[in-house]
Every structure is written in structure tokens, then in C-alpha cells.
Image (tube, rainbow, N blue to C red):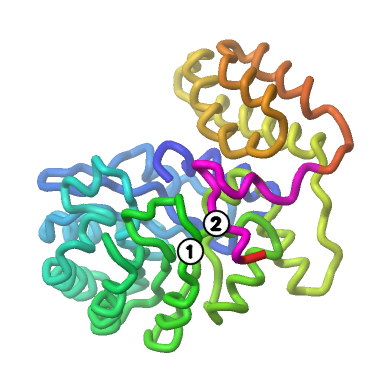
Amino acid sequence: MQAITHLPFMRVMHAFGGPDYFVTEYFRVYEGYVLDKNILRSITENATGRPVDAQLIGQHIPSLVRISKELLEFPTSGIDLNLGCPAPVVCRKDAGGGLLRKPDHLNRILEALRKSIPGRFTVKTRLGYESPEEFTRLIEIFSQHGLDALTIHARTVRERYQTPIHPEQIRFAVQTMPCPVIANGNVVDVSTGQNLIAQTMADGLMIGRGAIRSPWIFKQLRNAYAGEPVQTITRADLLEYINLLYDTIADDLPVFDEQKHVNHMKKYLVYIVQGLDTEFEHQIRRATTGKNFKQTCLTFLDSREPVPVFPPNHSKLFCGFDTLR
């Protein structure tokens, strides 16, 4: 997630258990593109000990091949092609989810990248641009190129994040693809994660928005599968997480601008405050200083009251996950 899942965010996730591997923000590849040094830091300065895949987005084949080869000179664990981003500014340029409208060109991209990447090469995709019915054709293409893994966000580009997912399509991919399949979409707690695996038989989970909301989710899932107690998260735990996130990102900035940093933190808080308190969300959106931001969080989170396990089911950020409960 651009400007969200950067190096300091990875550090914070790792402090709470973290995923088995990370994926960078995407390198937005186009003709003449030069590697973004800040995103590259997620690979070169990552001390979590976890593998980090470099994520590409774009549609210009020579540039994608060139950047892939450049990235392989760094200690990345693999190259991942993003076919899932639904942002209009990306799709208009036939990148991300926009590429799903051009399956023949996508086929050529995958062929070129597979030939140029000797190691791990993976893809993250949506089910199609307009309809899940497009997925059959996409699977035919994906299965031809020796992918090392396929991650599936089980919605179309048009559906963005505003519908339930289609787990039956992930299961179809599991039954069809010769590589591991990773399920993505609507995992917000242990039960939704376990149920998505049970419904799809996928080999693993990719978690984005659910991890921003609750960085404990990775450890909780590991504990649940191991038959161990699962931690109950309190408001005080959430306060600790927010403060660590605030300080870790601030410490990583080359130049600290308080107001810009507070505004950046709001990108995380919109996920975190879902379902807590309407007044908390109202006040945090209007915070302009670090002192005001932290005091607002302290006011609403300084207690041992458990936080809701689930966010609201019909918000703009979390929608339709109740089908996995």
C-alpha cells in the first residue's frame, strides 16, 4: 500500500510478530524510470530478518524487464507484479488492475519477466476488471508462465473494496494452478483468516488493511493454528501500537515536519478507529499537532477495555467480511 507499508511500518509490524514475508510498496515502472531509493530502503535496510519481495507496477515491457534485473542486484527475495491496484490514476495508464483489461499484453509481460527473472517471480491479481467471469481466462494465462506463487484479491477492480469477496474463485485457482495460491481480501481477525483458508484451501494469506487495523493478527493466527491462547487486544494495547507507529515513522524522517507527520498518521488511523468511537474519529481527523494527536489517542484509549474484534461491516474501508465469520 503506497505511502503506508514502508520500511518503518514493516519495523512496527515485526515488533508485534509480523508476517512471514513482506512486499514493498510498488515501484511505479515506466519508460525511463529510475529506482525509487526510499522504497528500495525496505529491501536494503530491512533488519527484520524476514524476506522482502520487490513489487512492480507498470505495463512497459522493456522497462519492467530492466528494473527487475536492477532489483535482483539487491537482497530482495523475489519480484512481484501488481495486477490488483484499483486506483483510477493507475488503471488509466493500463497498469495494476488496469492491465487485466488487456490479457494479450499481460501475457507478453509475464513471458518477458519470467525469462528475465531466474529466481522467485510472483503475481498479485484481482479476479478481473469488470466481472469475476474474466478470471478463467486470466488463470489460463497465469498457468503458462511458471509463477512461484499467485496471490488473489478475490474482487474485481470495479468492486474495489465495497463488496464481499468471491472465495470460490480462489478455490478454483487452487485447483488449477501448479503453484501455491495466496488468498487476500477481508481478513480482519483470526476467524475470517481461518475461514478464508477453509473455504479456499489456499496455501496462505496476504493481509493488508486488516494488519494496519491490528498488527497482532499475524501472531494471533499463528497461535490459533498451533492451538495456543489468542491474545485479547485492549484499548491500551492499541494506544501502545499507535504511539510506536508515530515515533518509529517520525524517527525515520530525514526532516521532521510535525503537521505533515500528523497528517500522514491519519492515513493509518482511518483504519484503526473503525468501530471504536465516533467522537474519537471526529477528533483525530482534526488533530494538527503531535501533542493534540497523542492526547486524543490517550483520552479514548487509556483503558483495559477490549477493542471490538470486527470493524463495521459496511464502511468504505471494510465491507462484506461477515461472509467469512
Does the image show residue 47?
no
Which quarter of the rendering shows the C terminus?
Answer: bottom right
Q: Amino acid at mark 2?
A: Gly
Left-right relation of 218 to 165: right
- Circle 1 residue: 165
Q: Is residue 222 left or right of residue 105?
A: right
- Residue 300 position by quadrant: top right
**Is 320 on the left-hand or right-hand side of 308?**
left
Residue with the mark numbered 2: 320
Query: Residue 243: horizontal and vertical position, in percent?
Result: 69, 29
Query: Which quadrant of the structure image shows residue 159?
Result: bottom left
Which numbered disc flags the more N-terminal residue, 1 or 2?
1
286 in relation to 160, above or below:
above
* Residue type at tag 1: Ile
- Magenta stretch in the rendered image: 307-323
The residue at 38%/77% (across/down) is 148
Q: Are marks 1 and 2 in contact (CB under 8 Å)?
A: yes
Who is closer to the viewer here, 70 or 103?
103
- Where is the N terminus found, in terms of image quarters? top left
Q: For the point 29% across and 79% down, which residue is it? A: 136
Dot 2 surroundings within 10 Å: few (below 14), some, or many (20 or more)? some
User: Does the magenta portion include 258?
Assistant: no
Q: Nearer the viewer, residue 2 or 325?
A: 325
Query: Which x, y percent locates residue 91?
Result: 23, 49
The image shows residue 83 at horizontal and vertical percentages of 30, 60
Please give the label number shown on residue 182.
none
On the picture, is 97 further left or further right than 278? Answer: left
Q: Residue at x 38, y 88 (%)?
A: 176
Q: Residue at x 78, y 42 (%)?
A: 307
Asked whether the viewer can see residue 140, the reply is: yes
